[in-house]
Image (cartoon, rainbow, N blue to C red):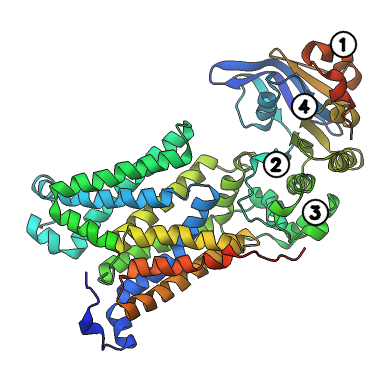
Amino acid sequence: MIALDDTLADVSWIERISLFRWALSAALIAGIVCPIAGVFLLVRRTSFQGIALPQFATAGVVFGFAILPWWIEHIGLGDLTAESALSDTHAAMNYHFAWAAVFTFVGLAALVWTGRRNLGSEIGRTAAAFAIANAATYLFGRLSPIGKGHADQLLTGEVLGVGLHEFETLAVVLGLSLLIFVWFQRDLLLVSFDRETARVLGKHVTAFEGLLNVVVGLTVSVGTMTLGPTMLFGLLVLPPLAARRFASSMTNFFLLSSGIGVLAVVLGVVISFELDFPLGPSIVAAAALALLPGAFPVRRST
Amino acid sequence: MSVLLRLDRAAFGYGRRTVVSGVDLAVGAGDFLGIVGPNGSGKTTLFRGILGLIPPLAGRVERTSAAIGYVPQRETLDPIYPLSVTEVVAMGAYGRLRGLRTLRRVDRDLARDCLARVGLAERAHDAFASLSGGQRQRVLIARALMTRPQLLLLDEPTSGVDRGAQAHILELLIGLNTREHMAILLVSHQLAMVRDAVKSCLWVANGMVERGSVADVLAPERLAESYTTVSSMLEDAP
């Protein structure tokens, strides 16, 4: 990862954008897609999953680092050695993405399973899941200081070092997620809003709920791997929360959320470059500004 | 009379627990049936079985009607969704749509027509959550009409709405039944509403289901065995 330091102070905006184009492009794609996933989390009243799931993904990444020597010795990672795996972007990224995805889906499955059995409240279950994932991150980190360092970097949100391969992976996964959200938007909305009517109309409710979980899980795991849990949680939660106040229809809600996500990324980049702040938290701070108009009463025509 | 729904010795329940059994029922065009019975008697279980939401534990359920319109209890729908009235009504056509296909002109016209039939054409662009309880119920009826149903099933359609709204909903349902010959089956704990609207009743109690005329099923002597406040329930007419 590259930190924006004093040596960049005299670099023009065009050159900065060119230098960090993959990171900025990745943030823009996340700004479009994550708020759409966040809309579903919000209306299904599972927004807190947006903070627990990225933590599971982070724990998965650190776990991947912790068992990397064992993995290479017993299973193998191409022709890589433990040392070369740490510097090989492609192999390491795919390997850690796989672990992020595994941990995200395990966390998601646990949340869905406990939810179906009404074990405690939604907030209580998600808080417990976050506590467990957070503890696991530190415990695995003790086994792998390199993994812990990587997780700390993700948590800090300094993501300007995102390279071509990370961008490609994120673009493919989030592009696929966007396609599914658009293609199945009506079905996902109907099964979320009115499960029983969806069944009466012949929809495969369990299949669509499973699809939604898979798409959210993939979005979270690749997003966390690439952009870190801070930015991901911010983009999942804040734009939909800000847009909800002003949305007059669901179509409007999706578009407004995505629009706020993109604006937050653009404004966050400006804050980050101008004030030399890490990009992830800058984008979250910019997204938080979108909540301000909602603090004032809205005059609606009747 | 063409039969739209037939239950033959059907039993419904959850897991291995049977809640209602031995249900024989035929519903034809123009029928208007109310499902009544004490709390916990199995009304909802029977209703869910008829809808196909739970499979029969025994016997047969035969739905010959191609399209069933379903109106759920509006309290089950979360107001956090910023859906417009038009979007809610359009959901009735989702069963016919696949993938990226948008609503056809004929479906959009039908949505407008359904909203007009329930008297809410002018509220098409309003937020669903901003409507009153009675108006929301009428929007859900409009959504059910989008399937062009021959059989309309409603779960507690007048629960939690004021008397004026109850009267409006009843008038609407009676109109659909008499003018359009639509078969209607509703479950309700509001006996006065059932008495004033339906043509016959299903009495659900002690795991058994019995069909009879409104006068027989809602006879004060029978109700006195199951309800403690019969007079107030029957007087609660809109």
Task: Report helix, strand or loop for mark 1.
Answer: helix
Chain of the residue where label 4 is placed in the rendered structure: B
Q: Which mark is residue A237?
A: none
Residue A252 seen in the current view: yes
Q: Which kind of residue does numbered mark 1 sit on?
A: Glu
Earlier sequence position, callout 4 versus callout 2: 2
Earlier sequence position, callout 3 versus callout 2: 2
Q: Which mark is residue B221?
A: 1
Task: Report helix, strand or loop for mark 2.
Answer: helix
Chain of the residue where label 3 is placed in the rendered structure: B
Dot 2 corresponds to which residue? Answer: B74
Residue B1 seen in the current view: no
Q: Which kind of residue does numbered mark 2 sit on?
A: Arg
Q: Residue at x 72, y 57 (%)?
A: B86
Chain of the residue where label 1 is placed in the rendered structure: B
Q: Is residue B138 left or right of residue B76?
A: right
The answer to whether the residues at label 2 and label 1 have Cβ atoms under 8 Å apart is: no
Earlier sequence position, callout 2 versus callout 1: 2
C-alpha gap between disc 4 and disc 3: 27 Å
Dot 4 corresponds to which residue? Answer: B189
Earlier sequence position, callout 1 versus callout 4: 4
